[in-house]
Amino acid sequence: MRVEVSGLTKSFGTVQAVTDLGFTVEPGSVTGFLGPNGAGKTTTLRMVLGLITPDAGSATFDGVPYAALPDPVGTVGAVLETAFHPARSGRDHLRVYCRAAGLPVSRADEVLTAVGLAAAGRRRAGGYSLGMRQRLALATALLGDPPVLVLDEPANGLDPEGILWLRGFLRHLAHEEGRTVLVSSHLLSEMEQTADRVVIVGAGRLVRQGSITELRSGAQGAGVVLARSPDADRLAAVLADAGLGADRGGDGLVTVTGATPAEVGARAFSAGIELHELRAETTGLEDLYFRLTAGQEQFAATSPAPTPTPTPEGAAR
Amino acid sequence: MTALVRAEWTKLLTTRVWIGLVAGACVLAGGFAALFTGLAGAEPDGGQPGLPAVGTPQYEEVVFSVAANASVLLLILGIIGMTQEYRHRTATPTFLATPRRGRVVAAKLVAYALAAVPVALLVLAVDVVVVLVYAGARGAAPSLDADNLQTLGAAGLVLVVFAVIGVGVGALLRNQVGAIVGALVYLYVVEPIVSSIGALQPAYKWLPGGAVQAVTSDFQAPDLLEPWQGALLLLGYGLLTALLGTLLAVRRDVV
């Protein structure tokens, strides 16, 4: 099932959250929805799911808007912010939505097992760790065995093992089971390892979309490379001669910008310079991501906010 | 719709809120029944008439209709049933499962009306048991004749309809604390003042409090509606708030 987003626009009061945003999500692949915090990712996903009414534009699943889907739970599974009644057990939470969707309540236990939460199913959701909440949200999304999955920052709060598990799980759902997976993140490194395609947004607008490979080749893979050598001064000189930006750091370190590790290694080798360390600090794609979204964060950190002037106690009413 | 109503029952029964509210309703009804029985026939100090004595039809009407006072707890049950979706942000999964949000509100109205029936029966049973035992001990246990059953039925009807009104108020106000506080202020501050002002009497009979009195009082009261009119008016308040809530509040963005 194909997801098509076109011309989505939404403002909250004076804040323009999303502007004329359009992209498509294809089945059988994981599409990363990438952008800095405040870029409008969550607003966009909520518009796609009919929770927020857009000012303009549309989002459809094989041509049908979410609100008109005959079987929403069996068509689209969504992981948004973790929303549970804290006093209700995870299993009961799932049973509520089994009932609402007309599914057998036994489905609750199946999805709990699928996300590795079977042992905690009868405990109150209020006592769950952040990672367990994410797993419960994912379990809710899987209830109707939907062909489309929409996930908003699902890696938040997962430990490294959980992230690895999630990555494999999403890729399995897309590649082996042919589902359509749209997953948002503000972390490029995460998306590089999970997604086949990425849609990059900044300040509510589409910045770039394409496969990871396309974007990588567009950026030529050149980023920041760290090299360490006992002969660092000469290495820096050789690289500078080759037209690369090379900065000399302490302890034999040279920071090279606009290069790949292979290039730096080749220069060092041909000049006969011994290397003790050579690694990419950022990939070209990461540089590209920073450049594409630079200055577009809604909450760009500037100077700390001034502390409010203390009011006299009598006036503080 | 059946599936959605069952989903609401599952929501209701998988937290413990209902236990406290139902217990509170039983205590309230039983407590007032005991209080009024204990004070029945007591000679007043001032010039005001005291409570009617045990064994009189007036006494029986008072102690059997007192169960209707527990309606405030069913009102709160309905308010919580609706507003917890916003308070705990479960509105997101709920509206994802049922994108046509009016159906969610309709399902809650039906689910809470039906769930309120056994609750009302339990509250009435507590009332009746307390009255039969205590008044019996004081010498004249009332019989459950047609008049008294009618009084009990009216009280039960008020209890059920207040759960419906609670859902409606919750749909309109969305904020749980605001809705509960607002409802209590209305019932215990605004209405008593309105009802005490003579010039407002013609309006009072159209307010929920006047409607409750119309349903539960079967003595002659020229300023009140007929019982069936009062019941319809109460139900109308529940459905009207639910409709307004659906149109004005529930359709708003869930962010």
Image (spheres, coloured by chain):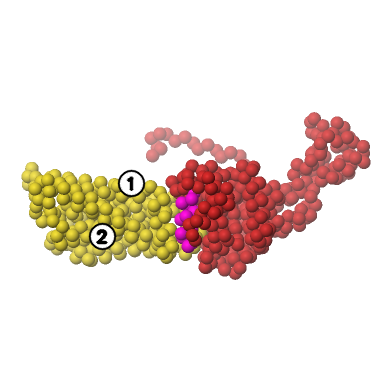
Q: Quadrant of residue A237?
A: top right
Residue drawn at x 51%, y 43% as measured from the top left: A128
**Chain B, which colour?**
yellow
Read off the chain for label 2: B
Residue B237 in percent (x, y) is at 31, 62
Report the span colored magenta.
A90-102
Who is closer to the viewer here, A31 or A260? A31
Residue ID at (39%, 59%): B108
Q: Position of residue A94 (x, y in %)?
A: 49, 54
Q: Provide the secondary structure element on which disc 2 rests.
A: helix
Chain painted red: A
> Which quarter of the figure is the C terminus of chain A placed in?
top left
Q: CA–CA distance between discs 1 and 2?
A: 21 Å
Residue B88 image label = none
Inspect the image, locate mark 1, and give the three-letter code of the amino acid beneath it. Gly
Mark 1 or mark 2, which has the lower sequence index?
A: 1
Q: Residues within 10 Å of mark 1 (few under 14, many from 20)?
A: few
Q: B53 or A64: which is nearer to us?
A: B53
Would residue A124 be visible to someone looking at this image?
A: yes
Q: Which residue is mark 2?
A: B157
Residue B20: image tag: 1
- Residue B150, by quadrant, is bottom left
Prevailing secondary structure of the magenta residues: helix
Compared with B144, A90 (above or below) is: above
